[in-house]
Image (cartoon, rainbow, N blue to C red):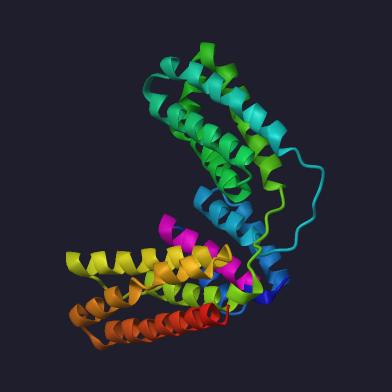
Amino acid sequence: MDPRTLRIAVGLALESAILSGAPTDALASFYSDPEPETAKALHLSLMESQDHRDREAGIWLQTGMDQASAGLDPAGLAGELNKMEYLLYVLIPRAGDAQREVNDWMNYTANAAQLLTDGFLVDAKIMLNRALHVSRTPAVEGLKAYPGLAYEVGVFQEATASYYREAMGYPVGLQIPEETLDAALKLQEGMLEVMRSRVSVERQRERQLVLGVVSGLSSSLRRLMEGKPGDARRDLEKVPGLMETWLDVAGGAEKRELVEVNLLRVRETLDSLSSQRSKG
């Protein structure tokens, strides 16, 4: 696999960890110079974590790794998940104080089934990871103190774990076109710098600008990963104006440098995408 693709996958894992509040040091360090064998070890560590946020980052990291393809049956798994959805629905009225958790469990399960059917394997894995997490919460565990529910809840927990393990074995890999790969990597570098910056953003107006910048970069990055440079350029065209406004209100040399460096990066990417458009 192209090392640039692995780096983007590490960046997706890092983005996930930042957004969820999971520890980021290992992923951030690895992002600067990812290596396939080290990626395997880091992926294993993340997937074996008891923290669902680590496992979600591991799911994203897997998209940049070489994977074996085995005999898979997403349609069959989706069917089993639909049955589980119904059984959890029936459980909700009897779940007492755990009704909210069981409802979330049911919704994650239903979403995973639909995503499998639609072919969105990464998102389906994430939903099953969340279903597994909520199935193990103290509120759900507490239901097993009631003789009339203990066996039923235990069976549902084991089934969820089994479905999760099956889904984690499905190969998922990034397929980013060569012509948009470098631009995607450049945008991701800037987005992660903004997201990881420890420069404080005290005022509401500045927070809104930062959120707008990250949203625009993220949307453009996804379009580039899909091989849609025209859509990526349109999404990205909104970002320089936001960053110029941010620069006007930013205080302190460190923050201004952060904005200036990444504003230049965005403009260079726009020039590159415009050049590709004119050639096409």
Is 238 in the magenta?
A: no
Q: Which residues are magenta?
A: 5-21
Report the residue at 44% width, 65% height from top. 218
Q: Nearer the viewer, residue 155 or 72?
A: 72
Q: Is residue 34 visible?
A: no
Report the residue at 49% width, 20% height from top. 89
Corner quadrant of residue 117: top right
Report the residue at 71% width, 31% height from top. 76
140 is higher (above) or lower (below) than 206 = above
Q: Is residue 213 left or right of residue 55?
A: left
Report the residue at 51% width, 42% height from top. 130
Q: Nearer the viewer, residue 257 or 118?
A: 118
Question: On the rendered image, what quadrant is the C terminus found in?
Answer: bottom right
Q: Position of residue 32 (x, y in %)?
A: 56, 79
Q: Is residue 73 visible?
A: yes
96 is higher (above) or lower (below) than 215 = above
Q: Nearer the viewer, residue 75 or 228?
A: 228
78 is higher (above) or lower (below) than 248 = above
Q: Position of residue 31 (x, y in %)?
A: 56, 74
Q: Position of residue 54 (x, y in %)?
A: 54, 55
Majority secondary structure in the magenta region: helix
Is 18 in the magenta?
A: yes
Corner quadrant of residue 67: bottom right
Question: On the rendered image, what quadrant is the N terminus found in?
Answer: bottom right
